[in-house]
Image (spheres, helix red, strand yellow):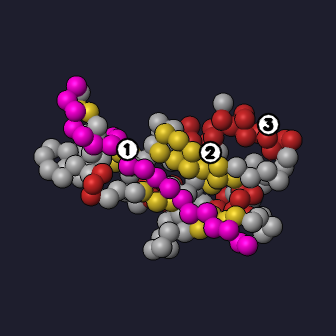
Amino acid sequence: MARDAIDSVVKIDPKASFILMGDLNDDPTNKSIYEVLGAKGKIAETKKTGDMFNPFYAMYKAGYGSLAYQDSWNLFDNIVVSNNLINDPKQKVVLAKSDNNKFWGNIFNRSFLTQQSGQYKNYPLRTFVGTNFQGGYSDHFPVFIYLLSKQ
């Protein structure tokens, strides 16, 4: 459905730039995101109109995640950008790498968002575990990208 909406916009305006974000319930390498949605892991793979880049692909491949399940990290929280946002030199807003210049995407996992002890140490600090209130925020860490103005 998201791919259809993107294709509809690109058909009307091939120079359109867009950002798609959310809990996509799959990792960046899963077929549903990489092939069906077409969110590629390298900017070099986004050559034609309508192509998209997933800034979190390399992070996931390096072992990072925004949620943990059965001691395995997943990165279901994705922000996908159109190729026009990264390849068009006329854009006034551009995607930028994080301060460490390693990844295009970022996971906000500060200590106040993290379980500090027990079986789920270092997992996101959940609001509830079953019916028990934990006082946390979410079972996912927030994700973000940097967009810089060229003005």
Residue bounds of the magenta highlight: 131-151
- Of circles 1 and 3, the one toward us is 1
> Which quarter of the figure has residue 69?
top left
User: Where does residue 32 sit, x and y in percent of width and height?
Assistant: 56, 37
Q: Secondary structure at mark 1?
A: loop
Measure how far apart labels 2 and 1 are at the Cα level: 18 Å
> Which quarter of the figure has residue 149?
bottom right
Measure how far apart labels 1 and 3 are at the Cα level: 31 Å
Name the residue that disc number 2 marks: 20
Q: Work out whether mark 1 precedes mark 3 in sequence or the reverse, and give the earlier one.
A: 3
Does residue 49 appear left or right of residue 105 in this picture?
Answer: right
Residue for point 40% across, 57% down? 108
Does residue 52 appear left or right of residue 12 in this picture?
Answer: left
Measure how far apart labels 2 and 3 are at the Cα level: 14 Å
Q: Work out whether mark 2 precedes mark 3 in sequence or the reverse, and give the earlier one.
A: 3
**Which kind of residue does numbered mark 3 sit on?**
Ser
User: Where does residue 129 sit, x and y in percent of width and height?
Assistant: 23, 32
User: Where does residue 122 sit, x and y in percent of width and height?
Assistant: 24, 52
The residue positioned farthest toward the front in the image shown? 135
Badge 1 density bin: few <14, some 14–19, many ≥20, Cα 10 Å: many
Name the residue that disc number 1 marks: 140
Q: Secondary structure at mark 2?
A: strand
**Which kind of residue does numbered mark 2 sit on?**
Leu
Badge 2 density bin: few <14, some 14–19, many ≥20, Cα 10 Å: some
Residue for point 52% across, 47% down? 78
Which of 137/143 is in front? 137
Counting the numbered discs, the total is: 3
**Which kind of residue does numbered mark 1 sit on?**
His
Name the residue that disc number 3 marks: 8
Quarter occupied by the N terminus: top right
